Image (tube, rainbow, N blue to C red):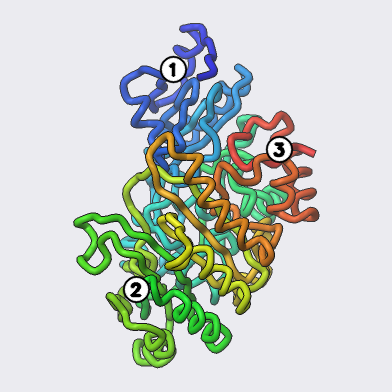
Amino acid sequence: MASVNFRPEDLADLRESVRGPVLEPGAEGYEEECATFNLLCALRPAVVVGATDASDVRAAVRFAVRHGLPVAVKSAAHQVVSSAEGGLLITTRRMRGIVVDAQERLVRVEAGVRWNDVLPRTAEFGLAPLVGSAPGVGVVGYTLGGGQSPLLGRSLGYAADHVRRLTMVTADGELREVTPRTEPDLFWAVLGGKGNFGVVTEIEFEVFPVTRFYGGCIYFPGEHLAEVLGAWRAWLPTVGEDMTSSVAVQRLPDLPVLPEPLRGAFVVSLRIGYLGSAADGADLIAPLRAAAPALIDLVGEKPFSAIGEIHIDPVDPMPYCDRSACLEEFSEETERALVELVGPESGCTLASVEIRALGGAFDREPAVPNAVSSRGLPYVVFGFAVGAPGQEEALRAGLAKVIDGLSPWAAGRNMVNFLSPDEATDAEGVREVYGPERFERLTAVKKQYDPTNVFRFNHNVLPA
């Protein structure tokens, strides 16, 4: 691990200037403060500041800049791009404020809030945010990377499209209120540019009058992958923007937490999120239900707060490698290739390979444009492979076979929230993710607000 030597009085000054803990490697609480969701992506900063409010964040950023340290930020740590060695890590889990303005349909949250903190608060007022498939992720990181909802996205767009205001600390240590009026270029860049421009301490966003949905997932035996994919592909053009869906090919672990037919099973999980009535939803998905005999059918009428039941994403930390790609199309040829790559005869050992249908409002520019990179792309594929430390090479090889095998249909651009540490590792890779025009504008904003690249433990946009 790269070592950084502080004088005792330097850290004493830092401790004096913040209310939260200041921890070095080896200190009690350091490991807990650095804990990540992906157990193969450890954080090993030279110093950690557990921020309690925006003033702690300001003090931490100013200390880092004064001592020539790059800065990393962690909330729930579902996406870790770098170990942050030799840097200063700011953790935000103590910043948990939530304010719901039901009359204006606005919610304001601090940087450490997760979606499962927000859902019960908005449900009290019959309101719903553009939460993603995993309610355990942090609100800020999810939103700054775009934020793709498995229920509201095709009708309302990305979560980033509905942000009204942010407060953030930039590399000069200033706390800024960022709106389309006060800081238009920074507002555009941060929403989609993720952590490249500073530390967001608070975010305000719109919520919507939605209280229920018809959805969940249907598990089919993996041997019927070709039939399920074929039915899904033919069905997609027949549904409106009030229907969102995805398909995942999963090799599930043999764990007691899973119901008997799913333990250790090779399955196809069809996910449904529909805003219309249960009766209409059942009629709409009848062709999918008829595609193959189901192992378990969990689609039904649900309260909005049960949105996590659409994907049933893992909730506990695990060791994994992941890769992703956006596709320009999902044709008959794409479908055949996917069956060959992950189907029953493939020898594939990946825990999950999913393809999400986008389209609808995901394609439309919001009233106030932003830097979201995946607009206009109809599909995103995400794969992950689970294994113990030391198995990374084999895990990455399995992922490469699948994702590279889909390259004939892949777009250059990609969804920022799905990028792994192995993707967009240099300036050219980041440029490809955003596309040249968007990337050039991002580098100009970076030069204005972070000219020395203090915030570089990410899929890094270099200053122009």
Query: Along the line of sight, which residue is nearer the eye, 143 or 462?
Result: 462
Residue designated by label 3? 449
Above or below, 95 relative to 436 = above
**Badge 3 element:** helix
For marks 1 and 2 on the same chain, the one whose residue lies earlier in the sequence: 1
For residue 319, which quarter of the picture? top left
The tag on residue 189 is: none
Q: CA distance from mark 2 to mark 3?
A: 52 Å
* Residue 39, position as x, y percentages in the image: 39, 39
Q: CA distance from mark 3 to mark 1?
A: 27 Å
How many C-alpha atoms fall within 10 Å of the one at disc 2: few (<14), some, or many (≥20)?
A: many
- What residue appears at the point 63 percent right and 53 percent down from the top-left corner? 192
Residue designated by label 2? 221
Name the kind of residue labelled 1 in the image: Glu
Q: Nearer the viewer, mark 2 or mark 3?
A: 2
Name the kind of residue labelled 3 in the image: Tyr
Above or below, 222 relative to 414 = below
**Badge 2 element:** strand
For marks 2 and 3 on the same chain, the one whose residue lies earlier in the sequence: 2
* Residue 442, position as x, y percentages in the image: 73, 47
Residue designated by label 1? 16
